Amino acid sequence: MKREVLFIVLVVFSWATIYGQTEVQNPPPPGYWPFYFCDDDYDEITTFDLTMVESYIVGDEYINDFDFYYFNKESGISSLIPIEDPINYTNSTNPDETVMIRRIEISTGYTYDIYPEIFVLPPLIINKPSPLAMCNINNNGFNTFKLQLKNDEILSGLDQSLVSITYHESVEDAENNINSLDENSYTNSVAFQQKIFPRLTYNIFDNRYLIYPGCYSITELDLIVSQDSQDYCEDIEILLYSDTSPRPGFNYVNHLIVKNTGTEAVTSGTVEFAYDSLLTFNSVSNVDSNDNVTPTSNGFTLNFNNLNVGEEKEIDISMYVPTSVSLDTKLTNSAVYTGADFNQDNNTFDLSEIVIGSFDPNDIMESHGPKIQFNEFTESDYLYYTIRFQNVGTADAINVRIENELDSELDESTFQLLASSHTNNLNRLGKKLTWTFNNIHLPSEDMNEPESHGFVYYKIKPKAGFTVGDIIPNTAAIYFDFNEPVITNTFQTEFEERLSVGKNSFLDSNLYPNPASDYINIEFKNNSEKNIEIFDVQGKLIMKKETQLKEIQINISNLVEGLYFVKIKDDLDGGAVIKKIIIK
């Protein structure tokens, strides 16, 4: 409910009157002077000190040169009633009450009468706002807050043109209205949880107006930095999918999606894309005019700007599969967001596909490829499926329908649709997914080959308890108008155990922090000789270390921000593992 901000106790419009022949020293400006006092409740009656205006009228340096007298003026100059105790003056009526202040210069006897307007403001009542929570993205309990996000809650309907809000680290600073904090960018000074003190004050509307001391209110605001709090968190999700499987002698197109899944707009960020060494890069298209792409030796970096909550950007990446690439070869392209945000797990995406020969354009595939290393896939990870279709008939397909029965090893409650080529209606009944594309008039391959394709793209988790040797099949049926369904291939995902891994393998190594800025720690399970190499995204060897210890700390403070690969080789079992790390 909006509060009434101003109660007018007295408003009188008349010019001040000068008595005597000579202009007095340091006269006030002509006309009316509004003075504001604060009520202690909502009855429009309050007690205040009228004498406090004296130094404001003549200035502190002349205060002893004048005498002041205070009067109630009921009607006309002849009815002046002296105010016996101006220090503790209580207004009695509202608004028909007139006060006059008579100033007499001691040395000359000249008088000057002032008729101020007196306003009684309602008390400022401020309730404690809810906590302001941020993500612990730096893993140290500190983050940068936008305190102004709490302004509306603190104002509680008051007009901000009539009041001002300041934030302070201590009650003393708030009481004295000093050392106000930057409400657009404040980094907490106490880790994890800190109290600061908002102050709500009536504005001084004009330099001729006076605000009586005490017209303010102070409360507490809790700042919280916690991994469990997602308010005002930045979170960027990276996705990759393809239109068709890679074939020797043909172009192979990937689509990169950058999506803001957080609760805070992201003003800028960088995504690095690296393509498989067997591919030849062609081009990048569909890049927003506000963004830019910088080529690298094995891909490019995308610098994007102004991605609001829930928005996404999609760019198209064209590559060529040389005829020398053998069938059944697995090609892997990678994309990574290099910034620090709430959920690091969705910042990186690897798209792996098998090179095929002649193919049916109606198919289903999963981004990890047919085999997944069991020790590299956790219960928090997703499988990413793409169902692709193409009209290879002789006329446009008015309606298309996809039916996809989920395997019993997939948890249907974790299903999330990520993208689709056309507007559709999705229905999930138990484990059966149905997409209906009505009136899309999908052209045939002969009519318009590029526009004859379509797809749906979703993610889903396996049920908990999957283990080495488990195989998850997935098949879809695609209906073009009233024709018999086209049954896709059955894509099988198998969890396998990495070969040649000794029981004391370094593959159980732990690398942290990630992202990192000054150093990284790597912990191992054994004391065998280990070789550690760090490469940039262009494949250039940046650093090399050797150790026989169970833990090593590596200084990376001289590395520029971006994605790097840490390759660890163990002389004990001859195996090697590559870990990704982000330097910020």
Image: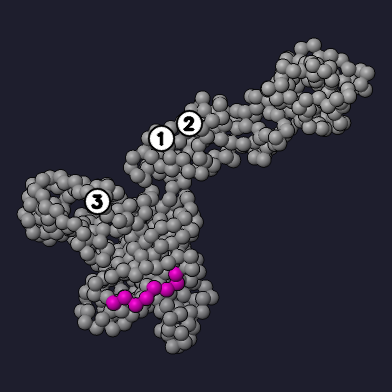
> Which of the 4 image quadrants contains residue 276?
bottom left
Which label sits on residue 169? 2
Taking 256 as reference, is 177 above or below it? above
Element at badge 3?
A: loop
Could you tell which of marks 3 and 1 lies nearer the N-terminus?
1
* Amino acid carrying mark 2 in the image: Glu
Left or right for 548, reference 378: left
Q: CA distance from mark 3 to mark 2?
A: 35 Å
Which label sits on residue 556? 3
* Amino acid carrying mark 3 in the image: Ile
Counting from the top left corner in percent of width and height, residue 320 is at: 31, 79
Q: Which residue shows up at 47% across the image and 87% down it? A: 447
Element at badge 1?
A: loop
Instruction: Check whether the beta carbons of the residues at disc 2 and disc 1 lie within 8 A of each other.
Output: yes
* Within-10-Å neighbours for mark 2: few <14, some 14–19, many 20+: some
User: What segment carries the magenta color?
Assistant: 280-287
> Which of the 4 image quadrants contains residue 338?
bottom left
Could you tell which of marks 2 and 1 lies nearer the N-terminus?
2
Q: CA distance from mark 2 to mark 1?
A: 9 Å
* Amino acid carrying mark 1 in the image: Ser
The dominant secondary structure in magenta is strand
